[in-house]
Amino acid sequence: MYQGITGNKLLDANIVLTKAQVGPKMKVGELGCGSNGHFVFPASKLVGREGIVYAVDILKVALDSIRRRSLAENVKNVRTVWSDLEVFNATTIASGSLDVALLINTLHQSKKRIDVLREAMRMLKRNGRLVIVEWKNIASPFGPPEEDRVNLENLKIAAEKIGLKLDEEFFVGHYHFGLIFYKL
């Protein structure tokens, strides 16, 4: 992946999910999950049999990969959802239903970041947590081009304007920043 730095060495799912306070019986959505389930499958263990993890992506091939792994590992609490997160109300997850929404390395891929935030917020319960992890705006030997990276301060301002409250900024690795917002 990135010159030998992959998986938890690059971005530790356990740190992020602990910060997100993912636990039994919760409904969690990983928005822009990708094909390997780096957060989906650890979250599925934390929510247990009575919880649900929604793996959301626009790429059907990524969702097929998640489905295959779920079947192979007999994981029953993961649901794949195809959606364009840039379109409000496009995701077939009920409004106000998620305890936690994860946007992990997703925003830098969009030119409509506010729209993605609004769609994530729509799905969250009141006081639900939105966890955002993105690439820091620093030179690095891998990751997206610097011009595509999300500006941390602009993100905080934009999130506040649409009704999210910053709860915590946390260390998630040398190449990423982590933020936790609450839906008011």
Image (spheres, grey):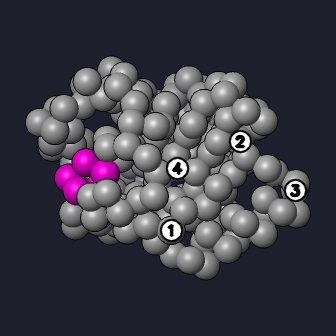
User: In the rendered view of the protein, which quadrant contains the C terminus?
Assistant: top left
Q: Counting residues from the N terminus, which is met first, the one under dot 2 or under dot 1?
A: 2
Rendered location of residue 62, percent (x, y): 60, 72
Per the image, the residue denoted by label 1 is 82
Circle 4 sits on which residue?
30
The reply to whether the magenta stretch includes residue 83 is no
Which class describes the residues within 10 Å of circle 4: few (<14), some (14-19), or many (20+)? Answer: many
Please provide percent x and percent y for residue 8. Answer: 66, 46
* Residue at x 67%, y 74% (from the top left corner): 64
Q: Are marks 2 and 4 in contact (CB under 8 Å)?
A: no
x and y, in percent, of residue 114 in the image? 20, 53
Which three-letter amino acid code belongs to the residue tagged 3? Glu
**To which residue does mark 2 refer?**
44
User: Which residue is at the front of the view, 148 or 51?
Assistant: 51
Element type where label 1 sits in the image? strand
- Residue 120 visible in the current orientation: yes
Q: Nearer the viewer, residue 181 or 13?
A: 181
The quadrant of the picture occupied by the N terminus is: bottom right
Q: Are marks 2 and 3 in contact (CB under 8 Å)?
A: no
Q: Label 3: which residue?
A: 73
State which tag comes first along the sequence, 2 or 3: 2
Residue under the image location 78 percent in, 59 percent down: 70
Q: In whole angstroms, how far apart are the C-alphas of marks 2 and 1?
A: 18 Å
Disc 4 to disc 1, C-alpha distance: 12 Å
Question: Badge 1: how crowded within 10 Å, few (<14), some, or many (20+)?
Answer: some
Q: Is residue 45 above or below residue 18?
A: below
Query: In the rendered structure, which disc, 4 or 1, sits on the residue that comes first in sequence?
Result: 4
Q: Main secondary structure of the magenta part?
A: helix
For the record, the magenta segment spans 113-119
